[in-house]
Amino acid sequence: MRLSSGERIARCLTGQPIDRVPFGVFGVCWNPWGSTMQRWREEAGNPKLDYLRTIGADDDCPVLPLHYGVFPHFPREVLAEDAETITVRTEFGVVKRDLKTGSGAMADWVDYPVHTPDEWRHLKAERLIIEREDRFEKIDWSVWRNYDADGKAIQAGTFPFGMFGTVRDLVGVETMLYWTHDHPEVIHDMMEHLTSLWLWLYERVAREVQIDHIHIWEDMSGRQGSLIGPAMVEEFMMPCYDRIATFAKAHGVRIVSVDTDGNCSELVPLMMKHGINMFLPFEVQAGNDIREFRRCYPELGIVGGLNKNALAIGREAIDAEVDKARWMIRNGGRYIPGFDHLIPPNVPWNNMEYAARVLKDLCYEG
C-alpha cells in the first residue's frame, strides 16, 4: 500500500491503516522564525536554502487562499519607525510594533479596528460582507482540482482565523473579555457572523473540490490554561463549532483541527465533544505532555508536542524528544511528529538537520 500525501495525513490522524507516518508537515511545528532561517542559510552556506526540501518533508496540506476575514483590506501602511522598531497598520486593521531585528519576539499590539459596538456594526457592513465573489479572487480552480486529483489533503481555514482568535484581533483581548460581560450580544454576533462567512466560503469550495481539513486558529491559552473558562467557551464558541462540525460531517471532511498555544488541557475534551479531532502544537513549556493526552484521549489526532528548546541543546536532548515521538507512534498512533511551535533563532542548522534525519527515519520505520 502506497498512499498519497494527503490520504496518509488524513488516515494517520483518524486512526486508519497507513503505509508510514507523515513527515515534516503542519508548518507551525516545523517552520523557523525569519532570523532562524537567516542563520540556517548562513551556516549551511546556501543563501537560497529550502529547508523543507533539504530535510525531505512530505507534501503538506495546501491551504485555500481565500479572503477569510476583513475584506476589502485596510491599506497596509507604516505609521512610525525608529532605529529599532517599525509600527504598521496591517491589512486587517491591527496596529502593531515589531522589532526590526526579526528576532521572533512577540509584537506590541498597539490598536485594533473595533473599539465600540457601533464600530463592529460598521465593520461588519463594510468589510465583512459574506456573499462577495471576490473573496475567491486568488483561486485558480484548475490548480485545486489537480491537487484534489493528486490526493493532497486540501485545507480550508488558516492563521489568523478562529472564533476567539479573530474576535481578539478585531477588538483586543482585554476588550473582548470585558465585552463577554458588558456586551455579550456583540461577542455572540461577531462569532456567529464570522462562522456564517466561513461556511459560505466552504460551501462554495465544496462545489469544486473535496475539503479534507478544516483548521481553526485560536491561540486562547497561556501557561495557566484557557483565557476564558469552560462555561464561556461553551456559551460563546461551541455553537459555532457545532455548525462547522455539521458542515464537515455533511461534506466528508475528515480532519477538523484547532491550533492554540499554551496549556490546552481544558480545551481538548470540551472541543472534542463539538467535532474537533486534531490539536496542535502542544507547547511543552506550558505543561503539555502529548503522552498524557494520548492516554486520556485515544481518539484524538495529535501533531507536534516535541520540545523545540531541545534543538538548541544538542543530540542527547533531541534523542529524548525522538523517544517521545516513538512512544506516541507505538502507543495508539494518530500522531504526526513535530515541534511545539516555530523554531527559534538559537537553534543551529546542524542540530535541525540531525533532528529531521532521526525523525524521518522514525516515520519511515513502518
Image: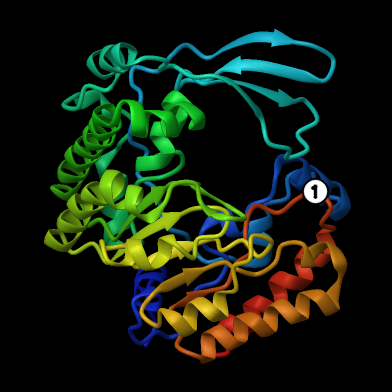
The residue that label 1 is drawn on is 345
- Position above or below: 182 against 323: above
Residue at horizontal 42 percent and vertical 51 percent from the top: 229
Kindly identify the amino acid type of the residue bearing the numbered disc 1: Pro
Residue 91 in sight from this viewpoint: yes
Q: Decide if residue 36 is on the left or right side of residue 335.
A: right
Residue 265 in the image: state x and y as whole percent. 49, 65
Residue at horizontal 33 percent and vertical 34 percent from the top: 68
Foreground of the two, 232 or 82 = 232
Foreground of the two, 213 or 97 = 97
Q: Decide if residue 324 is on the left or right side of residue 14.
A: right
Residue 228 in the image: state x and y as whole percent. 44, 47
**Label 1 environment density (alpha carbons within 10 Å; few <14, some 14–19, many ≥20):** many
In the rendered image, the quadrant that contains the N terminus is bottom left
**Among all residues in the image, which is located at the extreme front?**
181
Image quarter of residue 163? top left
Q: Decide if residue 25 is on the left or right side of residue 103.
A: left
Way the structure is coloured: rainbow
